[in-house]
Image (cartoon, rainbow, N blue to C red):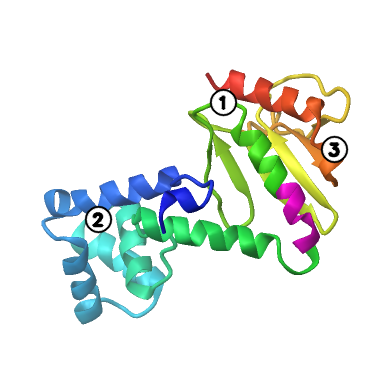
Amino acid sequence: MPQATHPYSVHPSVAMVRDWIESLPRKTGRSLDEWLRLVAEQGPAAAKDRIAWLKAEHGLGTNSAIWIAETSLGTMEETGDPEDYLRRAVGYVDAMFSGRKAALRPVYDELLRTALATGPDVKACPASTIVPLYREHVFAQIKPATAARIDLGLALRDTPATGRLVDTGGFAKKDRITHRIPIASLAEIDEEVRRWLKAAYDLDA
């Protein structure tokens, strides 16, 4: 799927998995395909047993063992293929705003446009239940919280909550997202929303 047909960017995890796949021959002596053949021929059937076997018998680290086991069983969500991710990203968003939440789609589309306009380096990288917005890190996220409301999450550190801004308790818990603004209509995507988006964007400089 060409990037120009949608507003999404490739999630950072895609590059991480791609780099891992490319490094396997050098680090382990086998390519991913070779590991998958070995697991199919000699490995245990269950995922947890495959992971333990890869670690104990072949000296793999935990992440590599998990990723190989999950790939071998078809449960590894990230393939390391940017085009595959972008196809799934569009599907994630369509699924998020379907059924009872379908009426929120115009609000989401406008909120996404507003967020992407915050700066030239903003990237939207959908996951299955949220749409994180990145600069260097996640500075905001869009989440359909109910059938009638989207929560715009913001990384604002210890900023005092004023106006419509709600403190989520995230700063005390050391979460990235510390505040949210509930949004139920197009009219609520206003100057206050743009101001807080810009504040979160600037904090991630």
Picture residue at 49% right of the left edge, 53% below the top: 5
Look at the image and tell me whether residue 62 can be seen.
no
Name the image quarter holding residue 105.
Answer: bottom right
Q: Are marks 2 and 1 in contact (CB under 8 Å)?
A: no
Residues packed near mark 2 inside 10 Å, few (<14), some (14 to 19) or many (20 plus): some
Specify whether residue 12 is painted magenta: no
Residue 106: in magenta span: yes
Q: Is residue 151 above or below residue 99?
A: above
Q: Which one is in front, 150 or 159?
A: 150
> At numbered mark 1, what does the secondary structure look like: helix, strand or loop?
loop
C-alpha gap between disc 1 and disc 3 = 21 Å
Q: Position of residue 2 (x, y in %)?
A: 41, 54
Label whose residue precedes the other's in the sequence (1 or 3): 1
Amino acid carrying mark 1 in the image:
Gly
The numbered mark at residue 60 is: 2
Question: Mark 3: which secondary structure?
Answer: helix
**Front-most of 139 and 189?**
189
Which secondary structure, mark 2?
loop
Mark before the other along the chain sequence, 2 or 1: 2
Quote the CA–CA distance across marks 2 and 3: 51 Å
User: Could you classify mark 3 by the number of other residues whose Cα lies within 10 Å: few (under 14), some (14-19), or many (20 or more)?
Assistant: some
Q: Amino acid at mark 3?
A: Glu
The picture places residue 192, in percent across and down from the top left corner, at 81, 26
The residue to which callout 1 is attached is: 119
Span shown in magenta: 102-108
Instruction: Identify the residue position indicated by label 3 in the image.
Output: 188
Q: Looking at the picture, how far across and down is residue 18, in whole percent?
A: 29, 51
